[in-house]
Amino acid sequence: MLTSGAFLCAQFRKMASFFSREPVMSKHLLSPQGEFPAAGLGRRLAAMFYDFLLCVALLIVTGGVYKLIQMQIIGEARMRTLTESGALDGDPLYSTVLLFVLFGFFAKFWTHSGQTLGMQVWGIRVQNADGSRISLWQALLRFMVSIASWLCAGLGFFWVLVDKQKRSWHDIYSNSQLVRIPKQKK
């Protein structure tokens, strides 16, 4: 009989193999198509800074909406009492909502156009090796490994300086690539 930890690991492996299968439907190729060079660290960091500013704004709005809903549920007086006592500090539901909102932001852009707004400005795109959009599973892997990269003092991002293909940890783990695309002619 498997222990609960081993059982969970086995179930996770099954789920990962299910989501990593090739889809039956045709792949959605991104435009423009072609062989593009890997994005360097400078462009990656610049795009991250732009997206950081957008994410801060998004989290502020999300926090405001969350607190308004919370106040409607528990009442303004009770909310004030709980806030002043510090009982709402470190609210796990609030943290979870913020994490899901951040993932939603990145997943939407990465799985549809391959570019967040910051990536559009700096002319970089995340894609599969064949130029197709990444899957939701790949987006989740990129998101989680990029968090781990930041927790390791950014080492996962600086990995592009030592990798021959200029890949970061989340590029490698999600089997995707970040490329520099030419400017679109208007």
Image (cartoon, rainbow, N blue to C red):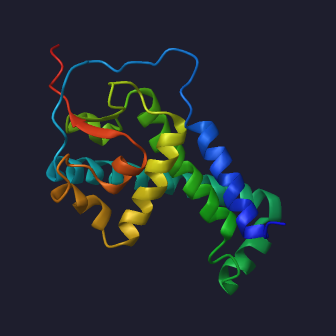
The one nearer the camera, 53 or 45, is 45
Q: Residue furthest front?
A: 1
Residue 107 appears at what percent x and percent y? 49, 40
Residue 166 vs residue 43, the one in the foreground:
166
Q: Residue at x 71, y 81 (%)?
A: 87
Q: Residue 41 at what x, y percent from top left?
A: 18, 53
Percent of width and height locating residue 23: 56, 24
**Rendered location of residue 30, percent (x, y):** 34, 21
Quarter of the figure that contains the C terminus: top left
Q: Quadrant of the N terminus?
A: bottom right
Closer-to-camera residue (85/114): 114
In which image quadrant can residue 92 be found?
bottom right
Where 84 sits versus 2, above or below?
A: below
User: Going 40% across and 71% down the picture, which residue do you hit?
Assistant: 151
Toward which corner of the image does residue 150 lie, by quadrant?
bottom left
Left/right of residue 73 with respect to residue 27 in the rendered view: right
